[in-house]
Image (cartoon, rainbow, N blue to C red):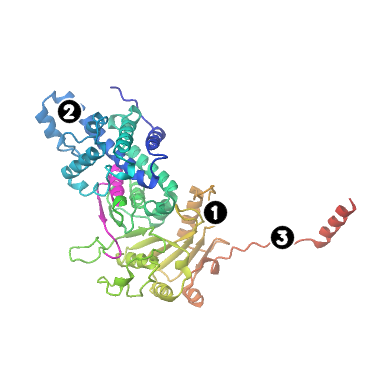
Amino acid sequence: MPHTPINQSEINKAVWNACDTFRGTVDPSIYKDFILTMLFLKYISDVHQDKVEELKKEFGDIPELITEMLESQSFKIPQGSSFWDLYEKRFEAGNGSRIDTALHTIEEANIKLKSVFQDISFNTDKLGDEKQKNDILRHLLEDFGKPTLSLRPSRVGSLDVIGNAYEYLIKHFAAGSGKSAGEFYTPAEVSDLLSIILAPQEGDTICDPACGSGSLLMKCGKQVQKNFNGSKKYALYGQEAIGSTWSLAKMNMFLHGEDNHRIEWGDTIRNPKLLDKNGDLMLFDVVTANPPFSLDKWGHEEAEHDKFSRFRRGIPPKTKGDYAFILHMIETLKPHSGRMGVVVPHGVLFRGSSEGQIRQKLIEENLLDAVIGLPEKLFYGTGIPAAILIFKKHKVDDNVLFIDASRECKAGKNQNQLSDENIAKIVATYRNGDNVDKYAYLASLQEIRDNDYNLNIPRYVDTFEEEEEIDLLAVRAEREQLKAR
């Protein structure tokens, strides 16, 4: 069967249309896992099928030799477990349990997929009674079985096309998922901004302790590739608390060809999993995250006895975990090269009590490098404006740069975006490190002390625009004319 080449927009459209099976029947926050998992299964099945046909041409029909040659493939697919095996039986009862069995068989055959599918079940009552579930899954298999969704390397070419389609889906699910969207996706422009500012280098270790679906981590990897002639000499590390989101991150990594990664599943604050051989927290060159805003029940009750001493500067409030993530991230920075960028709600800049004490200590230790105010409605699931805090372990002075980028964005109906120009201006201002009228201000440590360690951006960046003076005599004359008329 001939394979017509496919471009990015065609494949994006085809995978998005596959969601029609669920629309109006199942909530997007539920069906996103089914669609993204099916895309992954379809891709590895098509790669397998492509390779089998290639080997048959080369070696004839010698099953033993072909089986042996397939052992060297990235993913092994045991007999009867491919997408196409499921597709052939789609009219039979039991689609849900068949898909689950196939996924777990593939998981067992590939050590790098260990536990990836254990939190995702197609055989669930969330899809309705047995008949409705079987019909929905039959339609799903048929959608992915269409020629337009052939994901064979001989047709698709670059792996980036598949990875980009996966990202495209994640972004669209985030846009429609309301409050829960921030749990698994950071808008691409914010990830771009963070990755450019943090400037990961060849050989760097890069970590996101609240990695969601892994997009921000991979943007940092892409920066190394872009700036060092396609080099993949870097390592990605992450941890994610939600099981199904951890699975998305693992699949996302593989679909982008990011094999040098370690993503752990677990609660970063209560149970950090990225530890060295001595059981201490691993240290990284770059640490970046968009943690959940003001997380309630973050682990306050255990913080006082934290064996890693992450909260020695103070224990964050019980119902606001922002500084718990910040303090964890600070502790995982390498002593000289360590640099970090974290997205926070504005309250982190000025709230008092224990947060005020923690903030003061971080500033006095000369760890804070910059505060960047972002526009409102950038993040999925919340309209509030956020800020980015940049920390560095090895600073050359004790100043802090404040950037107010809150008024510059590409406005949208429900969601605002940072344009390439907006990002370029923030980056240039940060790198230049100096005052820009009504946009940026380089504050000394003494000025911050004088402000009682309050980092609220308007205290430092004056954006006040003087209004044009009104000529009262001219207004009065105009009113008299109108009266006369």
Q: Which image quadrant is residue 293 in?
A: bottom left
Tag on residue 468?
Answer: 3
Q: Secondary structure at mark 2?
A: helix
Q: Secondary structure at mark 3?
A: loop
Which amino acid does the dot numbered 3 rest on?
A: Glu
Q: Are the two marked residues, 3 and 2, in contact with CB atoms closer than 8 angstroms?
A: no
Q: Which image quadrant is residue 37 in?
A: top left
Which amino acid does the dot numbered 1 rest on?
A: Glu
Image quarter where the N terminus lies is top left
Of the image marks 3 and 2, the number of the one nearer the N terminus: 2
Of the image marks 1 and 3, the number of the one nearer the N terminus: 1
Q: Is residue 390 above or below residue 243?
A: below
User: Which of the pair 124/477 is nearer the observer?
Assistant: 124
- Is 442 placed left or right of 246 in the picture? right
Where residue 105 appears, as percent x and y from the top left, is 18, 41
User: Which of the pair 22/298 is nearer the observer?
Assistant: 22
Q: Label 1, on which residue? A: 408
Residue range of the region highlighted in magenta in the rendering? 246-270
Is residue 10 found inside the magenta-colored segment of the image?
A: no
User: Which of the pair 157/350 is nearer the observer?
Assistant: 350
The residues bearing labels 1 and 2 have C-alpha atoms spaced at a distance of: 55 Å
Q: Label 2, on which residue? A: 55
Count residues near mark 3 (Cα–Cα under 10 Å), then give few for <14, some for 14-19, many for 20+: few
